[in-house]
Amino acid sequence: MTKLKSAIAVICLAALSARAWAAFKTVTLNVPGMTCPACPITIKKTLNKVSGVSKVEVSYEKKQARVTFDDAKTDTKALVKATTDAGFPSKAEPQQK
């Protein structure tokens, strides 16, 4: 019984530790195909459906989407794919160092 409790404790600790390694990142996607004021609604809904996305801000004027996400659940490539699949090809701005 003690071995079982120890095994459960190790598994729980490992699961909690994995979450500690996750980091929230923010990326700006350039979306030149936004041609009308309704486009940002579609883009925002699309990006919010991606697992791990926590915040989406879309600017029609700048033709950009700013996305905050959990990098343990998704990545920039998945965000670009989501907008592209919705009919709005995008490209991530280079990260500033």
Image (spheres, rainbow, N blue to C red):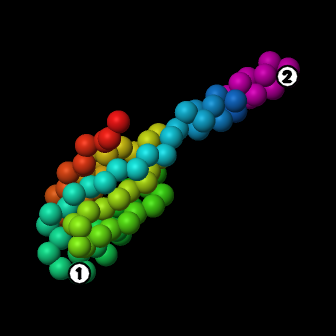
Query: Image point 20% across, 51% down: which residue?
Result: 91
Q: Position of residue 86 (x, y in %)?
A: 22, 64
Q: On the image, numbered disc 2 is attached to which residue?
A: 1
Q: Position of residue 83 (x, y in %)?
A: 24, 59
Kindly identify the amino acid type of the residue bearing the numbered disc 2. Answer: Met
Label 1's element?
A: loop
Left or right side of 3 for 38: left
Q: Position of residue 65 (x, y in %)?
A: 30, 62
The answer to whether residue 86 shows anywhere in this view is no
Q: On the image, numbered disc 1 is attached to which residue?
A: 37
**8 within the magenta span:** yes
Q: Which residues are magenta?
A: 1-11
Label 2's element?
A: loop
Query: Image point 40% across, 63% down: which residue?
Result: 56
Instruction: In the rendered view, tell whether residue 97 sits above or below residue 33.
Output: above
Left or right side of 87 for 20: right
Q: Position of residue 67 (x, y in %)?
A: 38, 56
